[in-house]
Image (cartoon, helix red, strand yellow):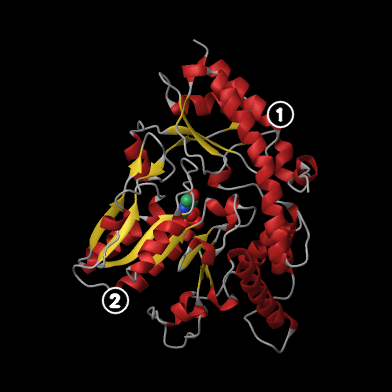
């Protein structure tokens, strides 16, 4: 199917502002059906979950709907879907749950490509347990993880490997499956950060080799929250601290306090909104078709952007050199501060932020200056006209 970007944009009231949003990797704009689902949940009768009254049944239905939507979205069982305040919070929580069984001398593997949300929780948990931290290194020239020393980095002592499915700074999609296969060979668990990936590619936890996978609905049109997916049998083996009266069932065991029903309803609506791009026999099949259509649209825009950048010659340096990557591009502008470029573009209603975007280790490995680089995130609602406006702005900014 072909993707009609103008029909798609009509769902987003905020896009009439005229701002060209290249800040999708930081969070997307919100379509009407998602906002309406949140409002409808809050204005309908709503109470604690139960079966007696409509308000109780509404709460129950919202939670069941959320589990079902993210089971389809992540390709995990419904009982393996955990809601969290954010991907960062979920990763911190699970780093504490998992590290309870780590011993001094055990090993944990993290990467220099990842957002710090999938690095620091593991490093800090390892420090507390006396475990050793090993790193998969980033090659700054190719923007790829170095895979040549994978077997030496993941060893018989490795308990957990944390890796991103796509870098929010460079767009690079590392070979997660190969890394996961090596981890499983030695009996380690694999925690995959799919926060950036999920905005551009449909997640399949099994295909990735992920024992745990996290995403954040606000990166794909939903509200600000996080979702973790895992095999319920694996979740059964983990015993977080709990309140005496609170339930011990999976997955509620990992969700502390009363669930934010409105956020769950909005997160479900985001999945349904994506699925409605290309309706098919099941929601999963619809999502597959929708992601294919969106990927084609984004790829065409990325080619337009990349060609336009090439025409600027050495006035811009494109650091996103991986072949397998999302349509997220990191630029350096020799002789210029990225923040100045961001401000110059903002004056033209073009939002392309500057920084390292919490990909702290990647920023260091790339040798980025303190102001970072200029990040250009193409989203499903991005148009050719916006790419041209961005390129015109960059040409004007870098004119000698
Ligand atoms: C790749 C990646 N991982 C993790 C996070 C953190 O997500 P959250 O804001 O849900 O904690 C982000 C946020 O930008 C991200 O881009």
- Residue 46: image quadrant is bottom right
Q: Which mark is residue 101?
A: 2
- Residue 47: image quadrant is bottom right
Name the secondary structure under disc 2: loop
Instruction: Determine the residue positioned at 29% across, 51% down.
Output: 149
Using the rendered image of the protein, determine whether residue 269 is visible from the camera's viewpoint: no
Name the secondary structure under disc 1: helix
Instruction: Determine the residue positioned at 54% across, 52% down.
Output: 197
For marks 2 and 1 on the same chain, the one whose residue lies earlier in the sequence: 2
Using the rendered image of the protein, determine whether residue 331 is visible from the camera's viewpoint: yes
- Residue 187: image quadrant is bottom left
Work out whether 173 lies above or below 211: above
Instruction: Determine the residue positioned at 46% across, 46% down.
Output: 167
Task: In this rendered view, identify the residue nearer to me: 310 or 149.
Answer: 149
Cβ of mark 1 under 8 A from ligand 1: no
Residue at image mark 1: 385
Image location of residue 337, percent across then percent down: 42, 24
Q: Left of 270 or right of it: where is 149?
A: left
Work out whether 134 lies above or below 211: above
Q: Which mark is residue 281?
A: none
For label 1, the crowd category at 10 Å Cα-Cα, with few meaning under 14, some 14 to 19 and many 20 or more, is few
Task: In this rendered view, identify the residue nearer to me: 280 or 240.
Answer: 280
Q: How many marks?
A: 2
Instruction: Determine the residue positioned at 68% across, 43% down.
Output: 296
Task: In this rendered view, identify the residue nearer to me: 392 or 178.
Answer: 178
Work out whether 351 lies above or below 113: above
For label 2, the crowd category at 10 Å Cα-Cα, with few meaning under 14, some 14 to 19 and many 20 or more, is few
């Amino acid at each position: 199917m072909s993707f009609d970007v103008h029909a798609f944009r009509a769902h987003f009231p905020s896009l009439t502002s005229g701002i060209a949003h290249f800040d999708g990797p930081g969070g997307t704009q919100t379509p009407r059906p998602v906002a309406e689902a949140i409002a409808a949940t809050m204005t309908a009768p709503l109470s604690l979950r139960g079966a007696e009254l409509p308000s109780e049944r509404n709460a129950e239905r919202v939670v069941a709907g959320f589990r079902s939507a993210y089971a389809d979205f992540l390709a995990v069982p419904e009982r393996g879907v955990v809601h969290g305040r954010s991907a960062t919070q979920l990763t911190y929580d699970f780093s504490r749950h998992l590290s309870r069984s780590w011993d001094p001398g055990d090993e944990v593997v993290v990467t220099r490509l990842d957002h710090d949300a999938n690095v620091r929780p593991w490093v800090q948990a390892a420090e507390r347990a006396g475990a050793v931290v090993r790193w998969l290194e980033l090659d700054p020239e190719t923007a790829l993880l170095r895979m040549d020393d994978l077997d030496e980095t993941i060893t018989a002592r490795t308990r957990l490997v944390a890796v991103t499915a796509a870098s929010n700074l460079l767009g690079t999609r590392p070979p997660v499956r190969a890394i996961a296969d090596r981890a499983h060979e030695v009996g380690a668990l694999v925690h995959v950060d799919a926060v950036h990936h999920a905005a551009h590619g449909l997640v399949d936890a099994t295909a990735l080799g992920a024992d745990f996978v996290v995403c954040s609905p606000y990166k794909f049109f939903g509200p600000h929250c996080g979702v973790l997916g895992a095999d319920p049998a694996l979740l059964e083996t983990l015993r977080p601290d709990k309140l005496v009266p609170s339930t011990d069932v999976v997955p509620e065991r990992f969700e502390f306090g009363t669930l934010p029903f409105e956020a769950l309803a909005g997160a479900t609506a985001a999945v349904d909104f994506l699925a409605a791009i290309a309706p098919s026999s099941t929601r999963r099949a619809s999502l597959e078709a929708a992601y294919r259509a969106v990927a084609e649209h984004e790829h065409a825009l990325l080619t337009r952007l990349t060609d336009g950048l090439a025409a600027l010659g050495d006035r811009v340096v494109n650091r996103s050199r991986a072949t397998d990557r999302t349509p997220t591009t990191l630029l350096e502008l020799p002789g210029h501060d990225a923040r100045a470029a961001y401000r110059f573009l903002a004056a033209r209603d073009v939002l392309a932020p500057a920084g390292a975007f919490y990909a702290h280790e990647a920023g260091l490995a790339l040798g980025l200056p303190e102001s970072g680089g200029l990040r250009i995130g193409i989203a499903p609602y991005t148009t050719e006209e916006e790419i041209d406006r961005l390129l015109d702005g960059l040409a004007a900014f870098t004119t000698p």
